[in-house]
Each structure stands twice: as structure tokens, then as C-alpha cells.
Image (spheres, rainbow, N blue to C red):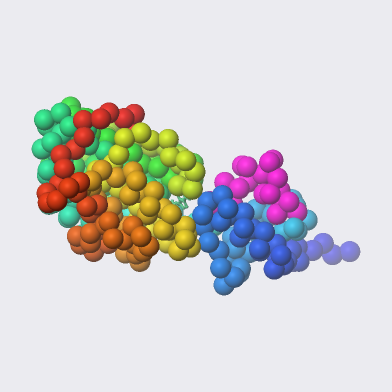
């Protein structure tokens, strides 16, 4: 008897419409990620390896696993398989220009007088985004560590958070960091490009599913949430915009990805101040409010 080749076994594992529906409901229910029918082939190809690695007979058994309490770890594996973690240093660089020229100067001036300043990179993937924020901030205020300034960086995927905490990237990434920030805030060595201590010291990484409760206390001065909401359906996006507005200080900024749009009732509260850059109306008429003195663990 001739043994079946692995690819034949793989080909024999089919995914029914019902399996796809169960996977889509699970992913949307827990992570907010919307999987339309047209993604069926993509879901199949990304999850087939999981079914095989777990030695399950078919996708129906896989669905049983992810729907059970014992499937918590596998739901995280599924999420990693289905989402794209693509990111770069200084991606969509116009936001960093805006940060340097208009958003940070008043915040850093307030920080130098004792105010609390909080920035959040929500859906930070492997950390290039929050480190780019840190480099920009340090280029304006090299001694930022002496003040009450923090960057919170979160992602639902614990693996990318672990990579971000390592702060080591392929050496080829060095060209994506403009000078003099590259020389000032990173080191190139045999392991790759290493984020320097000044930038690392400003950023706190944590795993956080944006669909869950947010444990942070205190409001934010800047929120980056770029190329994350694109995975959600419109109702979920609008809920997210509402929650961000609730977590933002008056006069603060929200920066989203280039293919994302703010829609729904929160649109009225957020003034467009640049390409995919929004500012929450300041409290009262005219001018931005000074940052609050309230402290938070973030
Ligand atoms: C394409 S990356 C974007 C990274 C970075 N913000 C950028 O623009 O370069 C999208 C990230 O969103 C994260 N993500 C997807 N759903 C999420 C959720 N429900 N809560 C938090 N992060 C989520 C993914 O894990 C992934 O790392």
C-alpha cells in the first residue's frame, strides 16, 4: 500500500461553510475581527496548519476546540495566524511630522512644568510604532525620562508584544530610521538593530485586546491606532472611536491608518487636523486645555 503524501492528507481536510461561520463568529466575538465570506480561502490556508499541527481530523473538530474553555490558547494562535502584523519604523511618516511640529511641543512644555503626558500606541504590533514615537519625543526632549511622560504600547497578540519588548530588529530596518535619531537612539550590532535604553525606558508594553475592558486610568494626550480598525466592521469601529474619545483629554489627538475613517456620532467631536489625524475639541471655546496633573500607572 502506498502511503498518502502529506499534501494529499491536507487536501482531504475541507472547511465547510458551517466551519467558516463558526470560526468567523469566534474571531469577531472575541477580537472584533470581521471575516467576510470572501476571506474563506485565506482563513482555510492560514488555519490548515493549525488543524494539522494539532492532529485534528477536520475543521469541525478545530471549531469544537476554539469554542471550548480549553481553547483559550488556540484562540490566540488562531488570531496570530489570521492577522497581519506588518509594521515599520516611521510608517505613514506624516503623523510623525505632525507629532514633532505641532502635537508634542505644547505637551513637552507642559511636562517640563510638571504635567503628566500620556501617549498610547494601540495595536502596536512588534513595537516599531511606539519606538518611532519615542525617538521623535526624545529628539525634542532628550531628558524626557526626568518628567512624567510615558508611552503605553499594547497589542492583542502576546507574541508581537514579546518581540517589541526585546527591542531587536533586522539590521536592514536601520535605514528606515532617519538620522540623527538612528545614531542617537539605536545601536547596530551582530544581533541586529537594538533600541537604546532612552527609548526603551519611555515605553511600557502590555497585551490588551481592544474589545475588552481597558484597565488604564487617566486620559491620553495622543492615541495612535493605525491599521487596526481596518479589521473591524463599521459598528465595531464606531464603538472603538467612542471609547477612544472617552479615553482622550480635551484637545488631544487621535491618529488612524491611511485606509481608515472616523464615522458615526464621534465624527462631530473630532476635528480633522491633517491626513487621518484628528483633534478632540478642547473643553470650552478656543485653545487647547493644559495637560492634567492627574497621575496614572500607564
Ligand atoms: C497591521 S498591524 C498595525 C501595527 C501598527 N499600528 C502600524 O500601523 O504599523 C495590526 C495590529 O493590530 C492588532 N490587533 C488586531 N485586533 C486587535 C484587537 N482586537 N485588539 C488589539 N490589537 C489588535 C494585531 O495583532 C496587529 O499587531
Q: Which residue is drawn at 22% across and 52% down?
A: 281
Q: Is residue 242 above or below residue 205?
A: below
Main secondary structure along the magenta-highlighted residues: helix
Q: Residue at x 45, y 63 (%)?
A: 234
Q: Which residue lies furthest to the bottom in this view?
A: 38
User: Toward which corner of the image does residue 295 lie, by quadrant?
Assistant: top left
Q: Is residue 163 left or right of residue 116?
A: right
User: Is residue 179 in view?
Assistant: no
Q: Is residue 45 above or below residue 181?
A: below
Q: Is residue 297 above or below residue 48?
A: above
Q: Which of 146 and 252 is in front in this view?
A: 252
Q: Is residue 80 left or right of residue 64?
A: left
Query: In the image, which residues are magenta?
Result: 61-80
Q: Is residue 25 above or below residue 170?
A: below
Q: Which residue is drawn at 68% across and 49% down?
A: 67
Q: Is residue 94 left or right of residue 246?
A: left
Q: Which residue lies furthest to the right in this view?
A: 1
Which part of the image, by quadrant, shows the N terminus?
Answer: bottom right
Q: Which residue is drawn at 28% across and 41% down?
A: 220
Q: Which residue lies furthest to the front in this view?
A: 284
User: Is residue 235 in view?
Assistant: yes
How far from the left and from the top, in percent, is residue 144? Answer: 18, 33
Q: Is residue 63 magenta?
A: yes
Number of marks in picture: 0
How far from the left and from the top, in percent, is residue 74? Answer: 63, 46
User: Toward which corner of the image does residue 20 lie, by quadrant?
Assistant: bottom right
How far from the left and from the top, in percent, is residue 240? Answer: 41, 53
How far from the left and from the top, in percent, is residue 235? Answer: 47, 61
Q: Which of 41 and 25 is in front in this view?
A: 25
Q: Is residue 2 magenta?
A: no
Q: Which of 147 and 161 is in front in this view?
A: 147
Which part of the image, by quadrant, shows the C terminus?
Answer: top left
Amino acid at each position: 500500500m502506498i502511503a498518502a503524501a502529506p499534501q494529499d492528507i491536507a487536501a482531504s481536510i475541507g472547511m465547510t461553510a458551517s466551519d467558516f461561520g463558526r470560526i468567523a463568529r469566534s474571531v469577531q466575538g472575541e477580537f472584533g475581527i470581521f471575516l467576510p465570506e470572501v476571506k474563506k480561502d485565506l482563513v482555510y490556508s492560514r488555519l490548515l496548519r493549525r488543524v494539522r499541527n494539532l492532529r485534528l481530523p477536520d475543521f469541525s473538530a478545530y471549531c469544537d476546540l476554539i469554542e471550548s474553555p480549553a481553547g483559550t490558547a488556540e484562540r490566540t494562535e488562531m488570531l496570530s495566524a489570521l492577522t497581519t502584523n506588518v509594521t515599520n519604523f516611521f510608517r505613514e511618516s506624516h503623523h510623525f511630522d505632525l507629532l514633532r511640529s505641532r502635537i508634542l511641543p505644547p505637551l513637552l512644555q507642559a511636562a517640563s512644568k510638571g504635567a503628566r503626558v500620556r501617549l498610547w500606541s494601540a495595536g502596536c504590533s512588534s513595537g516599531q510604532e511606539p519606538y518611532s514615537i519615542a525617538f521623535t519625543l526624545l529628539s525634542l526632549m532628550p531628558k524626557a525620562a526626568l518628567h512624567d511622560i510615558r508611552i503605553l504600547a499594547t497589542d492583542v497578540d502576546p507574541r508581537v508584544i514579546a518581540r517589541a519588548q526585546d527591542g531587536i530588529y533586522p539590521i536592514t530596518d536601520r535605514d528606515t530610521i532617519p538620522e540623527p535619531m538612528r545614531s542617537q537612539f539605536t545601536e547596530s550590532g551582530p544581533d541586529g538593530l537594538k533600541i537604546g535604553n532612552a527609548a526603551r525606558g519611555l515605553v511600557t508594553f502590555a497585551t490588551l485586546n481592544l474589545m475588552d475592558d481597558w484597565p488604564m486610568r487617566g486620559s491620553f494626550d495622543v492615541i495612535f491606532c493605525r491599521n487596526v480598525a481596518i479589521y473591524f466592521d463599521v459598528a465595531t469601529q464606531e464603538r472603538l472611536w467612542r471609547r477612544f474619545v472617552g479615553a482622550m483629554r480635551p484637545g488631544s489627538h487621535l491618529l488612524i491608518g491611511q485606509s481608515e475613517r472616523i464615522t458615526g456620532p464621534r465624527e462631530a467631536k473630532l476635528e480633522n487636523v491633517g491626513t487621518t489625524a484628528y483633534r478632540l475639541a478642547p473643553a470650552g471655546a478656543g485653545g487647547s486645555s493644559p495637560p492634567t496633573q492627574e497621575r496614572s500607572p500607564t
